[in-house]
Amino acid sequence: ETGVTQTPRHLVMGMTNKKSLKCEQHLGHNAMYWYKQSAKKPLELMFVYNFKEQTENNSVPSRFSPECPNSSHLFLHLHTLQPEDSALYLCASSQDPQVGFYGYTFGSGTRLTVV
Amino acid sequence: RKEVEQDPGPFNVPEGATVAFNCTYSNSASQSFFWYRQDCRKEPKLLMSVYSSGNEDGRFTAQLNRASQYISLLIRDSKLSDSATYLCVVNTINKFYFGSGTKLNVKP
């Protein structure tokens, strides 16, 4: 158990479905992140939340909608996805990134397949 | 030009070998550097930070060359369990950039 828990671990969804990914951390971290990892590509930062406020949206299509109700929980709401959105979605948390980088703790990821 | 570049490999080495990976970064303002390890179908985990003076953790040695803008990871006496993908991470003005990773296969 890494301290960052993601559910579900695997998800298969149709292009017309709506689903949500959940991330929870109990490390006392201030910042939470969503990353996308496609095959043979670098990790792509999608969203950053710092103290529950979204501080970065890396030009992510609106079919991905994040929500951060508190510093411990982060959601990624999905709707009308495309097959090319199939990837591993990783949540991470860290101490305040403005202060310094002490390293991310990643969740185990949700492996998403869009059919 | 990519912020962070790594040789994707794979590096196929026998047990006991010494292997080194390099990672180059494009922005001279980059402030901190890390190596992460990612096992197949698992999340990345922090392996070690890279300090200006170089640092060692058991069989692993990390070095930073600011003049040439690269960091390196040296693994001595490779074990089968070292087989994984090694990701270079660079912090540039509070943004973090990941390399694509270098795959290492240690063979018996």
Image (spheres, rainbow, N blue to C red):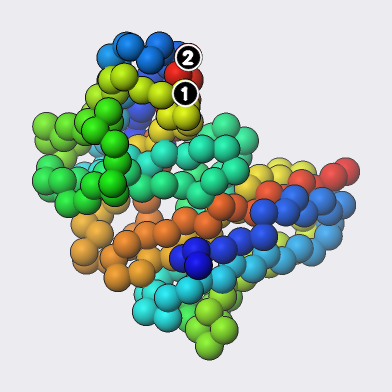
Give the answer, above or below, for where B54 lies relative to A30.
below
Circle 1 Cα neighbour tier, 10 Å, few/some/many (<14 / 14–19 / ≥20): some
* Residue A76 in sight in this render: no
Within 10 Å of the Cα at label 2, are there few (<14), some (14-19), or many (20+) other Cα atoms?
A: some
Residue A78 visible, this orientation: yes
Q: Position of residue B1 (x, y in %)?
A: 50, 67
User: What number is the disc on residue B100?
Assistant: none
Tell me if label 2 and label 1 are in contact, CB under 8 Å.
Answer: yes
Residue A25 location, x and y as percent? 27, 36
Q: Residue at x 71, y 45 (%)?
A: B83
Q: Is residue A69 above or below residue B31?
A: above
Which residue in the protein does label 2 denote?
Answer: A115
Residue at 24%, 33% in the rendered image:
A62
Q: Which mark is residue A83?
A: 1
Q: Nearer the viewer, residue A83 or B43?
A: A83
| The C terminus of chain B: image quadrant | top right
Q: Earlier in the sequence, mark 2 or mark 1?
A: 1
